[in-house]
Image (cartoon, rainbow, N blue to C red):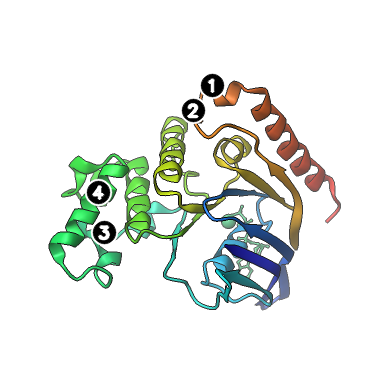
C-alpha cells in the first residue's frame, strides 16, 4: 500500500548541510503495524514528516496506493509526542476531536455521534465536556489518538507518542493501540525509542542506522495477534525479536560516525 523509495533529506543550515536521512527504502502492507527504532538524531522524525507529506524529501519518493505523496494525504493522520501542544487548550475534549471532522461530515448530529464513538473507543466517554488541562497526560494523549482516528485514516503515523507518560499509562496506551489495530485494521507507522514497545506492538521492526540513516535491519515479529503485556512478553519469540533489535542498535552505536 505504501512504498518508500530511496528517501534522502538534507537540511540547509547556517553551518552548512545537515544530512539527516541517507537512503531509506521499505514497503508497508495494508493493515501492518510497522515499528521504527533508531538512536536519537537518527532521522526518525524527519522520516515520518516526509512520510506524512509534511516535509519535502531532497531525493526519493513516497508512493501511496500507486500515487506519489507530495502533500499530506487525506487518508493519513499523525500523532506526535507532545500532546500538550497538539490539543487546543481552550476547547473541550469533544470539540478537539470534532474539529478535523467539520469539513468531512456536514450534519452536526452525525459528527458528534462519531466523536462520542471515538471517545468511547479510547476510554474517555465520560470526559467529553472537560478541557485538556483537566485531564492527565495519558488521557490527553488518548484525546489526540481519538482525534486522529476520527477521520478514519487508512494510515496512522505516530512519532514517539507515549514518550512523555509513566510506565503504567504507557502499557495501557500500548494495549489501546493493539485494540485499534484489531478493530479498525488501521495501518500504523510507529516510531519509538523503546525496543520492548516496538516488539510488543509491531508486526515488523525497522532499525535505522545513525544519521544519515539507512535501514540497518528488519526484524519480523513472530508473535500471535492476541497480545498481552504479561504473557506475550514472557514468550521466547518476544525475547528473540527483542535481542535481534537490541543487538542491531548496539552494532549501529559502535559504527564510527
Ligand atoms: N529543521 C531542521 N533543521 C536543521 N537540522 C535538522 C532539522 N530537524 C532535524 N535536524 C537534524 O537532522 C537530524 C535528524 O533529526 P531528527 O529529529 O529527524 O532525529 P530523530 O531520530 O527524530 O531524533 P530523536 O530520537 O531525538 O527524536 C539531526 O542531526 C537534527 O539535528
Ligand atoms: Mg524525533
Residues under numbered marks 4 and 2 in contact, where contact means CB atoms less than 8 Å apart: no
Q: On residue 87, which mark appears?
A: none
Q: Which element carries disc 3, helix, strand or loop? A: helix
User: In the image, which is nearer the foreground, mark 1 or mark 3?
Assistant: 1
Residue 134 location in percent, x, y? 23, 45
Q: Where does label 3 land, which residue? A: 96
Residue underneath mark 4: 117
Contact between marks 1 and 3 (CB within 8 A): the answer is: no
How packed is label 3: few (under 14 Cα within 10 Å), some, or many (20 or more)? many
Q: Is residue 5 above or below residue 257?
A: below
* 3 vs 4, front mark: 4
The secondary structure type at the circle numbered 1 is loop
- Residue at the image point whose x is 68% and y is 42% from the top: 220
Of label 4 and label 2, which has the lower sequence position?
4
Numbered disc 4: secondary structure: helix
Q: Position of residue 226 (x, y in %)?
A: 49, 31
Q: Are marks 2 and 1 in contact (CB under 8 Å)?
A: yes
Q: Tell me whether circle 3 and circle 2 mark residues in contact (CB < 8 Å).
A: no
- Assign the N terminus to one quadrant of the image: bottom right
In the depicted view, which residue is nearer to us: 223 or 21?
223
Q: Which mark is residue 228?
A: 2
Amino acid at each position: 500500500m505504501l512504498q518508500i523509495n530511496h528517501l534522502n533529506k538534507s537540511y540547509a543550515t547556517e553551518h552548512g548541510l545537515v544530512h539527516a536521512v541517507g537512503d531509506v527504502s521499505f514497503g508497508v502492507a495494508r493493515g501492518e503495524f510497522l515499528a521504527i527504532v533508531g538512536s536519537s538524531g537518527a532521522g526518525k522524525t524527519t522520516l515520518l514528516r516526509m512520510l506524512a507529506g509534511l516535509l519535502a524529501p531532497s531525493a526519493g519518493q513516497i508512493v501511496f496506493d500507486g500515487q506519489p505523496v507530495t502533500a499530506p494525504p487525506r487518508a493519513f493522520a499523525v500523532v506526535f509526542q507532545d500532546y500538550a501542544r497538539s490539543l487546543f487548550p481552550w476547547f473541550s475534549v469533544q470539540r478537539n476531536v470534532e474539529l478535523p471532522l467539520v469539513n468531512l461530515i456536514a450534519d452536526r448530529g452525525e459528527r458528534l455521534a462519531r466523536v462520542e464513538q471515538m471517545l468511547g473507543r479510547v476510554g474517555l466517554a465520560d470526559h467529553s465536556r472537560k478541557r485538556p488541562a483537566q485531564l492527565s497526560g495519558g488521557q490527553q494523549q488518548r484525546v489526540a489518538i481519538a482525534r486522529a482516528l476520527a477521520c478514519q485514516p487508512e494510515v496512522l503515523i505516530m512519532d514517539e507518542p507515549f514518550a512523555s507518560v509513566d510506565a503504567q499509562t504507557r502499557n495501557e496506551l500500548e494495549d489501546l493501540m493493539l485494540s485499534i489495530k484489531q478493530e479498525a485494521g488501521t495501518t500504523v507507522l510507529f516510531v519509538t525509542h523503546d525496543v520492548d514497545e516496538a516488539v510488543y506492538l509491531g508486526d515488523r521492526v525497522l532499525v535505522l542506522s545513525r544519521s544519515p540513516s539507512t535501514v540497518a535491519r528488519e526484524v519480523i515479529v513472530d508473535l500471535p495477534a492476541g497480545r498481552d503485556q504479561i504473557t506475550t512478553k514472557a514468550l521466547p519469540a518476544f525475547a528473540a525479536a527483542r535481542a535481534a533489535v537490541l543487538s542491531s542498535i548496539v552494532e549501529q552505536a559502535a559504527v564510527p560516525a
